[in-house]
Amino acid sequence: MEIRLRPELEALIRQDVQRGPYQTVNEFVEHAVAMLHEQETWLAEHRNEIATQIDEGYAAAQRGELVEPDQVRSRLNELKRSRLDEQPRG
């Protein structure tokens, strides 16, 4: 398979290869595609749950039941930490 990228994207990839743990552009692209695939799979598997939560949040907002920004940031940080803890270490 041949893929053509815009010059700006090629430059970004080369920068990441130079400063990151990747030995080659191919290694970087393989890693990026694997990560994107995992993300897309997760989103597909949780599509209904996400839609339900969006609907619940919208309904709560319509009722004036909004969450304070600090609470949102705190909850997002908790979710990020738990997600990082779930990822296999390499």
Image: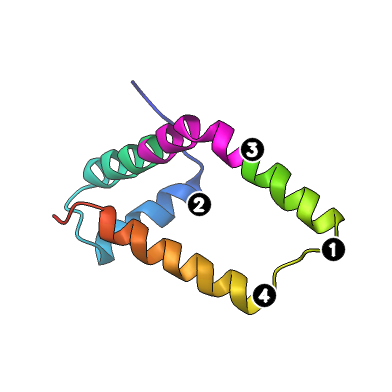
Q: Given the image, on which type of amino acid does mark 4 rest? A: Pro
Residue 19: x percent and y percent?
A: 27, 66
Magenta stretch encompasses residue 39: yes
Q: Is residue 50 above or below residue 4?
A: below
What label sits on residue 69 in the rendered view? 4
Q: Which residue is mark 3?
A: 51
Q: Secondary structure at mark 3?
A: helix
Q: Secondary structure at mark 4?
A: helix
Residue 2: x percent and y percent?
A: 36, 24
Magenta stretch encompasses residue 49: yes
Q: Along the polypeptide, which appears first: circle 4 or circle 2?
A: 2
Q: Along the polypeptide, which appears first: circle 3 or circle 4?
A: 3
Q: Are marks 1 and 3 in contact (CB under 8 Å)?
A: no
Q: Which residue is mark 1?
A: 64
Q: Along the polypeptide, which appears first: circle 3 or circle 2?
A: 2
Report the magenta residues as a range.
38-50
Q: 73 and 67: which one is in front? A: 67
Q: Which residue is mark 2?
A: 8
Distance from Cα at disc 3 to Cα at disc 4: 22 Å
Mark 4 against mark 1, which lies toward the viewer? Answer: 1
